Amino acid sequence: MTGSNLQDNKIDPLTKAREILRNYPLCDHCLGRLFAKMGLELGNDERGKAIKTLLAMQLHVEHRNGKIDREELRKYAINAGDPITRLYAKIYDEEIKANKCYVCGNKISREYFNKHAEKIYRMLKEYDASTFLIGVSLPQEVSLRELEVASNLNLETSESIKNEIKREVGKIIKKKYGLEPDFTYPDVVVIINYSDETLNVIINPLLFHGVYWKRGRNISHTIWISRSGVKEYPYSIEEFLNDNLNKIFDSEKIIHHASGREDVDARMLGTGRPIVVEVKKPKRRKVSLEELNKILHKQLIEVCLTGKSSHSVIEYLKGEGSKKTKIYKLLFYTEKPLEEPIIRKLELELKNRIINQRTPTRILRRKKDYLRKKRVYEVKIKKIHGQVYEALIKCDGGLYVKELVHCDNGRTSPCFSEILKMGAYPIELDVIGVEVDGYINVEKCYEYVHQS
């Protein structure tokens, strides 16, 4: 609510507070929260204390004028506490004890905020966090009690107890310890359990984008275990990342998200394949890209990281990014030597051509059978030796390139064998180019590798 709205509605905090304190005991914080949108640069406890002080002055005047009796003053003193308890004691020479706050049970205080700020800071330090976010898990009965009090007054100036705890604890951590709250993607989220005052921590992963190269064959993306429990391939990109990064980040594990994936027996060369590396539950977060790239600069598998990433980049790589244009280099063998006119015919037939592909036979056991349509933009072929040829193929991501050669018993059409009217068989495959939309600086990685 804006200042003008408050003025138009003629909200009188003193009158409203008097009405509520006649029926409910409230601490300074819980009273002040009812008027949280009134006044600037004030804590709720300051608001509550100020209102109670003014009320004590008003009640004193009314008592002198005979407008309130001892019993009514006692009721306000029991529900409001200091300074009205002092006023009552002065007038009637009787010390009385205020009731516990109806909403928080006198739990909320500056000491409460400072105690949790210190505990949370120690936790944030343990996880090497620079940014944080505070959450509060509040029992339903507390939420219902504060709603009851606010709704009885029909106030639109109040805030929730959750908001006060989050804001005040966060302010202390920022001012005293120099860490910054981040409402978008903090390093660590800490949830304060209001009931037992324990803390739950959510450690956000570190995300880095970059590209990788795979210069050997029979290297899988993830550890590949057969149904019989045997490891199918000697090494994987998953193992490479965990072997090299887990210790430096003191993390739970490393996973990666790529823009598609090449076959296990295919190499990833050229400009590399875009990737996001996700570091799960790191206890060390402040590691430079230069340090990381030195560690990941290997011969068989290499990863070059260019910056911090986000979940939106992962979504892009898994979605639109996986469909982007790819360039492949393929060695293939034909039953008979190909004359130059036949080679040119094959190139022409496949230029800007839609390819109909059913799920390849070799992966039917783990993927559903359905028809996909992918485009081949260009094919360039040259003879290597005898009946062995090299093809450069530019096509949509997701096209099964090996099947484009041998047809997979008619499940891919058109294909090399169909156009050539003879058997054509892939020998080996390399990926040499992957298109991206500016999400990842491939050129920067490419330059880095060639300079290293």
Image: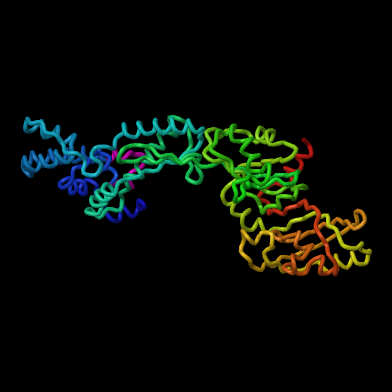
Query: Residue 41: percent from the left, percent from the top?
Result: 36, 39
Residue 203 in the image, given as x and y percentages of width and height:
49, 40
The residue under the point 44% across, 32% down is: 123
From this view, report whether residue 60 is shown above or below residue 260.
above
| Residue 108 in magenta stretch | no
Q: Is residue 235 visible?
A: yes
Q: Nearer the viewer, residue 154 or 270?
A: 270
Total number of numbered discs in the rendering:
0
Residue 38 seen anywhere in this rendered image of the structure: no
In the image, 76 versus 197, the foreground residue is 197
Residue 351: name its quadrant.
bottom right
Residue located at (56% from left, 39% from top): 253
* Whole-percent x, y for residue 10 in the image: 26, 53
At a point 18% along the width and 46% down the height, the residue shown is 24
When asked about the image quadrant of residue 415, the answer is: bottom right
Give the percent coordinates (x, y) of residue 284. 55, 33
The residue at the point 48 percent across, 34 percent down is 179
- Magenta stretch in the rendered image: 34-47
* The C terminus lies in quadrant: top right
In screen coordinates, is 180 left or right of 66? right
Nearer to me, 18 or 115: 115
In the rendered structure, does residue 38 fall within the stretch colored magenta? yes
**Coloring scheme used:** rainbow
For this rendering, which residue is in front, 412 or 61? 412
- Which residue is outermost to the front? 228
Q: Is residue 344 left or right of residue 411?
A: right
